[in-house]
Amino acid sequence: MRKLLFLLFLAGIQVLGAKAQDAVVIKTLKASIMKEAAEAMKEAPVTVTAAHSERSAGGRHDFFSEADYFWPNPASPDSPYINKDGQTNPGNFVAHRLAMIRLSRLVGGLASAWMITHDDRYVRQALAHCKAWFVDTATMMNPDLQFAQAIKGRVTGRSYGIIDTIHLMEVVQGLETMEASEAMDKDLLEKIKAWFSRYLSWLTSHPYGLTEMNAANNHSTCWFMQVAAFARFTGNDGLLNFCRTRYKTVLLPKQMAPDGSFPLELRRTKPYGYSLFNLDAMVMLCQILSTPGDDLWHFQADSGKSIEKGIGYLYPYIADKRKWPLKPDVMYWDQWPVAQPALVFGALAFGRKDWLETWRKLDHMPENAEVIRNLPVRHPLIWMKKEPSPVDMKAVMADVEAQTRVMLKEIDSVKPGGSGASGGGAEPGSLPFSPRTIENGRLKLVASRDWTSGFFPGELWFLYHYTGNPEWENQAMLFTAAMEREKTNATTHDMGFKINSSVGTGYRFSHDVNYKAVMIEAARTLSTRFNPKIGCIRSWDHHRELWQFPVIIDNMINLELLFEATRLSGDSSFYRIAVSHANTTMKNHFRKDYSSYHVVEYDTVTGQVRRKMTWQGFSDSSAWARGQAWGLYGYTMCYRYTHDARYLMQAEHIAAYILHHPRLPADKVPYWDLDAPGTDQPRDASAAAVMASGLYELSGYSRMGSEYRSAADAMLVSLTKDYRAPVGSNRGFILLHSTGGKPTNTEVDVPLCYADYYYLEALERSGDAKIVE
């Protein structure tokens, strides 16, 4: 399993940040959304009562459709229809299906427009259509599908017909999206939810529903997809949990082959179209059902089967259909692919720029009836709801921008050598250029060799990522350039802090290939500090008279650079070093209560531990707050790259120690050391920022995700409300009240650049309830 997980690094994946992804989606869809919504405002409701077929065994309010692939028998026109798999009979009755698809398009388009504009006219128009379909006794549809996909001369309805109501998914999702509007009629909404509760009851009890649920192919996937959507809309937690379990135990492991394909779909006469259809449905299950404690996106079944592998299997054939290794579909081969939801939601889940770019170029408004029938999710924006940030992101980031402009002016006023990050004419990075703190009332700049030098460039990248403003991109590139010389500096273990925070963040948001090369070279340099006898990367080179081979808990953060280097280069040596260091640190740095020592010294001859102590904490046996934060953040990050359950458990144990510590203040911003006596101890906002960022990530992996997110929210709210500097003050730093080295009385109750960096990262990870273009 670990070997398989490691192989995921070798795919050369390009990653795009969440804000940038959202911006691409909105920019791609906005014009078509607004056009569609404008047309939808002109439309009157049309329900199943508007058309009826003499071949229907149902009444006026019953949904009726006929099996698509059944045709009159040419040998005897009056005999029962015969099957022509994959070939759609244009003479079949489809008026009710078309009306339902129309409803889906109307509500999906109106809800999307409301998300962009918050214009309540769209809400009222959507409700008028839904009232006609689900509440008004004169026009409503009965909450069952007993007469769907009938076959003339054979059956009046059958289980396969249940797939028709996948087109109600965007109806309920659109209503859920608009529920926050003041124009939402709560009483009407409850009546609509009651209709879907009755339909869920029929789906989960009628023989047709049970047959579909137990199907072996896309029919079962689609049953669970729509049941999940309707269950979330109606608040049916029992059904939601049932769907999650079934995805993990039946759908994914039994339908997917080890290579990510769907064998049963490949056997059909339209293997390409059906593979796309089933993949889209499974992706939507992950989108609907995933929670912080039950992340289906990253779930793996036997043989490494995962939704990421499924998208990866089909992606080359979506990007270039000419590569498809099987025969073309018998019908509609030329109409596929379109803007498949698997691509956009997969890109959002895994940060894949290539998937998103391919999705962006495909057709977002297909008109072919068969394509639309097999594309129930046509409005991605309404499915992109996130956990809202506990703070007003727009206001906070506006203040951050203003403070950063103050900081840039301060830098220019104190930096030696004139303007420019490197100083006039000096070797890049050789002069102080990067803000670290305030010392004696003045801004203190440091050169690239300082362990904190990479944080301010990273902050600039976060600003660019959030705003898209080229001003911040230009500044980020300028300050990052001054960091690149550190890639060959083998005298420091802080390569990750310096290079990954600056160059790594830049690569994440810009994909500059030059940054990729710098990261790989920096990882190669960092690797020279690894001692295979000990199994760790050496930390400090100073005070060699005090110790042989010191390793500090902070060093866990530098492992991210190694993991990334393996992902970018395919060189597994970086990965192996990172895992060895994490394992050795887990073994020797932590006490029984999962608090961490700051420093562990090793014997270079035997590789054994010589002593355990502190350097920045209150005592050797105390819990230095930022050290606990490094451990929490580090093992969460290790789990992200390895999916090794031991790292997840370690992060959970560390989180429990921190959050349940009796001396953690009510505002959850810790004292500089959790065990330092008294209540007059200085706080450490930097530790809280690191903890909050780590907890947000951990909440996406752990079953205790809700607890971790709540704690992170509390920390972020406290930092935002009580620890932020007023705009124009603090020499441009964002946060106040951090503590660097209390035992030596250095950097006590001052701003620190790394507090600001991890605060911005925590803000990004907290989510944003608003659509930001």
Image (spheres, grey):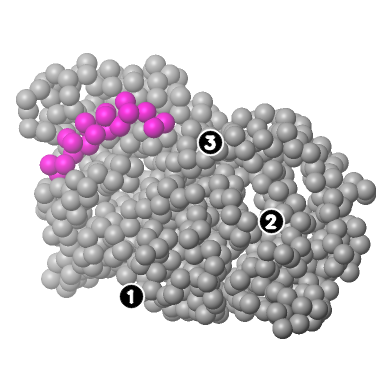
Q: Amino acid at mark 3?
A: Lys
Is label 1 in a helix, a strand or a loop? helix
Q: Nearer the viewer, residue 190 or 587?
A: 190
Q: Which residues are magenta?
A: 467-486
Q: Is residue 625 left or right of residue 147?
A: left
Residue 30 is marked as: 3
In this rendering, the label closer to the viewer, 2 or 1: 2
Q: Nearer the viewer, residue 282 or 481?
A: 282
Q: Nearer the viewer, residue 371 or 705?
A: 371
At which x and y percent is residue 199? 81, 61
Q: Earlier in the sequence, mark 2 or mark 1?
A: 1
Q: Is residue 90 visible?
A: yes
Taking the magenta stretch, the answer to whether it contains residue 750 is no
Is label 2 in a helix, a strand or a loop? helix
At which x and y percent is residue 170? 67, 51
Q: Earlier in the sequence, mark 2 or mark 3?
A: 3
Q: Is residue 176 above or below residue 569?
A: above
Is label 3 in a helix, a strand or a loop? helix
Which quadrant of the view contains residue 144? bottom right
Q: Earlier in the sequence, mark 3 or mark 1?
A: 1
Farthest residue, direction bottom: 75
Contact check, label 3 and label 1, Cβ < 8 Å: no
Q: Amino acid at mark 1?
A: Lys
Residue 167 is marked as: 2
Label 1 neighbour load within 10 Å: few <14, some 14-19, many 20+? few
Residue found 30% across the figure and 32% down from its top:
473
Q: Is residue 547 above or below residue 609?
A: above
Residue found 61% across the figure and 45% down from its top:
382
Label 3 neighbour load within 10 Å: few <14, some 14-19, many 20+? some
- Give the labeled residue for mark 1: 3
